[in-house]
Image (spheres, grey):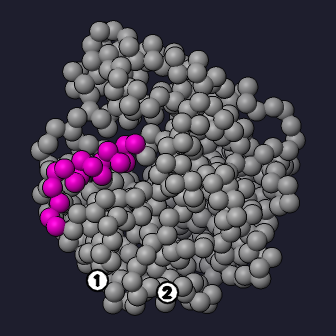
């Protein structure tokens, strides 16, 4: 287990004496947030940013960590998880099970009546050793018991089915249609098989690799864990070496419920709950979007979407990327500010509610876990319609830092505690959803091959407006989507244009201020 000094040195890049200030050594507020995330992950201790700022020297901060550990009664994974055949689900899983039950009770069919799969596909150019790829998939499935989990609908419990088997299905090019249809078919939650893997051979050195994982046991970060490990096990098999993965098994999906309960009932968890209570006023965290001219889509309209896609000007993208290289929170800050401004211009709102997903993997030992861990941060963003100032960005950035400090308390748990009548229901009000994803390259790496991600198809989206921002190398792409009927298509096109215009303005705003 690393020490506090080790964590400081790994983030600052220089050693620190007990009497030296984090900020005097070059630390920024974003780097401070990284320190708090590492303390949370590696030491299992929750420290707020405000308390860090009150103890900026290494010796003071180390004493603060010890004090917070004593206050919270930190519980390790081993202590939190008893030996049992059935285990509690986490808050995300409980809400998804309840949502499906209630949708069926209310006679709702289609997308909202089932849990759903996360799918990802990749084109592979080069020779593929199918035997070694099969072994790599099976090694990852053995490593993560989430794939072999069965859920009890009525009792909100889960059980690992050790005898369950998953392997790599192989198909020829003339079987593509049926193979992809089988891949995307709903998986029964009570059978203990919650994933599928598919290799399609078009030509001897041209393949497609697909995986489909039930969302109840995975999120996008989980998919990246799985793909990264498949690539590493495959590389090791091809070279005849040991794979570069942690030899210790990661925290398992069925352990997350215990860890979540331990955190949420601790002093740090209760402080986070109180923070969100102040933000949402003791009501549901799923804050509704008021957009003039919108309406609730009919059931059949929810199955289809309207989408507007664009790519940010290369010069603007370069300016924002340069800022992001100095401050890792920059992309989220400018995108939240730009989206709030664009919506305010179209709606005359005084503040804009935005739901932002976060990985929620900072709790102890969860960075390599395959489970549904991501949660939502409900933000009420202050609006400045005129050209934004550095002070505007600073206010949004501070809002994000405070929210990220308390993000470990799951939004679905807040809903159950603050607005139980809404918990697990299908969506009751339109939302404004923003997802910012920064990727350095393709999530799947295959030794000796070129791999390219297959773009996702157009599927249904939530009631409201969803904005996806994808930063991959120098390219920044945007997508604004909503269900058919929610807005006139011309209006959502104007909103998408207003978002790009706001980002152009933000690219030259407040770039040189002191990050601290």
Mark 1 closeness class: few <14, some 14–19, many ≥20 residues within 10 Å: few
When the figure is inspected, residue 302 is found, relative to residue 10, above or below; the finding is below
User: Which residue occupies 81% across, 43% down?
Assistant: 87
Gap in angstroms between the C-alphas marked 2 and 1:
17 Å
Circle 2 packing at 10 Å, graded few (<14), some (14-19), many (20+), is: some
**Horizontal side, residue 166 vs residue 266: left or right:** right
Q: Residue at position x 39%, y 83% from top?
A: 292
Question: Eyeballing the image, is 275 above or below 66?
Answer: below
Q: Is residue 102 left or right of residue 320?
A: right
- Residue 3 appears in the picture as rendered: yes
The residues colored magenta run 386-402
Looking at the image, is mark 2 or mark 1 nearer the viewer? 2
> Which numbered dot is residue 295?
2
Q: Label the magenta part by its dominant secondary structure.
A: helix
Residue beneath disc 1: 494
For the residue labelled by badge 1, is the local secondary structure a helix, a strand or a loop? helix
Foreground pick, 280 / 411: 280
- Outermost residue on the front side: it is 281
Identity of the residue drawn at 30% across and 35% down: 29
Q: Earlier in the sequence, mark 2 or mark 1?
A: 2
Q: Is residue 423 above or below residue 457?
A: above
**Position in image of residue 272 (x %, y %):** 53, 40
Q: Position of residue 153 (x, y in %)?
A: 83, 61
The verdict on residue 22 being magenta is: no
Work out whether residue 309 or residue 445 is closer to the camera in this orientation and state it.
309
Badge 2 element: loop
Q: Is residue 113 above or below residue 319?
A: below
Q: Residue at x 46, y 79 (%)?
A: 482
């Amino acid at each position: 287990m690393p020490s506090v000094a080790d964590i400081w040195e790994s983030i600052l890049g220089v050693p620190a004496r007990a009497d030296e200030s984090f900020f005097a050594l070059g630390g920024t507020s974003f780097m401070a947030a990284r320190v708090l995330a590492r303390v949370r992950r590696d030491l299992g201790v929750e420290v707020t940013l405000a308390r860090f700022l009150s103890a900026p020297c290494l010796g003071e901060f180390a004493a603060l960590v010890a004090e917070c550990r004593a206050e919270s009664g930190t519980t390790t994974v081993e202590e939190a998880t008893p030996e049992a055949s059935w285990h509690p689900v986490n808050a995300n899983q409980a809400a998804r099970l309840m949502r499906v039950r209630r949708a069926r009770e209310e006679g709702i069919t289609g997308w909202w009546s089932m849990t759903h799969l996360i799918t990802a596909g990749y084109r592979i150019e080069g020779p593929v050793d199918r035997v070694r790829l099969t072994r790599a998939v099976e090694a990852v499935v053995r490593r993560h018991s989430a794939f072999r989990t069965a859920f009890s609908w009525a009792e909100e419990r889960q059980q690992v089915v050790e005898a369950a088997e998953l392997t790599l299905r192989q198909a020829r090019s003339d079987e593509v249609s049926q193979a992809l249809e089988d891949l995307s078919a709903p998986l029964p939650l009570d059978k203990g098989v919650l994933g599928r893997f598919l290799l399609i051979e078009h030509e001897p050195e041209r393949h497609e690799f697909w995986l489909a994982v039930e969302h109840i046991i995975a999120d996008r970060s989980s998919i990246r864990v799985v793909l990264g490990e498949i690539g590493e096990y495959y590389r090791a098999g091809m070279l005849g070496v040991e794979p570069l993965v942690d030899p210790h098994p990661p925290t398992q999906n069925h352990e997350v419920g215990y860890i979540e309960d331990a955190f949420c009932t601790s002093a740090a968890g209760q402080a986070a709950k109180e923070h969100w209570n102040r933000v949402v006023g003791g009501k549901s965290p799923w804050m509704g979007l008021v957009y003039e001219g919108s309406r609730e889509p009919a059931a059949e309209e929810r199955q289809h979407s309207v989408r507007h896609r664009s790519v940010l000007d290369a010069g603007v993208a370069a300016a924002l990327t340069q800022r992001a290289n100095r401050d890792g929170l920059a992309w989220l800050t400018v995108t939240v500010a730009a989206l709030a401004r664009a919506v305010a211009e179209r709606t005359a709102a005084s503040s804009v509610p935005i739901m932002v997903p976060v990985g929620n993997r900072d709790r102890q030992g969860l960075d390599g876990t395959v489970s549904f861990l991501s949660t939502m941060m409900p933000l009420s963003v202050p609006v400045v319609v005129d050209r934004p100032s550095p002070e505007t960005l600073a206010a949004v950035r501070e809002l994000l830092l405070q929210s990220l400090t308390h993000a470990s308390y799951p939004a679905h748990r807040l809903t159950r505690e603050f607005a139980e009548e809404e918990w697990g229901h299908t969506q009751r009000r339109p939302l404004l959803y923003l997802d910012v994803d920064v990727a350095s390259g393709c999530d799947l790496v295959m030794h000796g091959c070129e791999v390219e991600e297959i773009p996702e198809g157009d599927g249904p989206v939530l009631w409201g407006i969803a904005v996806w921002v994808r930063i991959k190398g120098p390219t920044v792409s945007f997508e604004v989507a909503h269900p058919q009927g929610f807005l006139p298509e011309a209006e959502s096109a104007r909103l998408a244009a207003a978002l790009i215009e706001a980002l152009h303005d933000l690219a030259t705003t407040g770039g040189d201020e002191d990050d601290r």
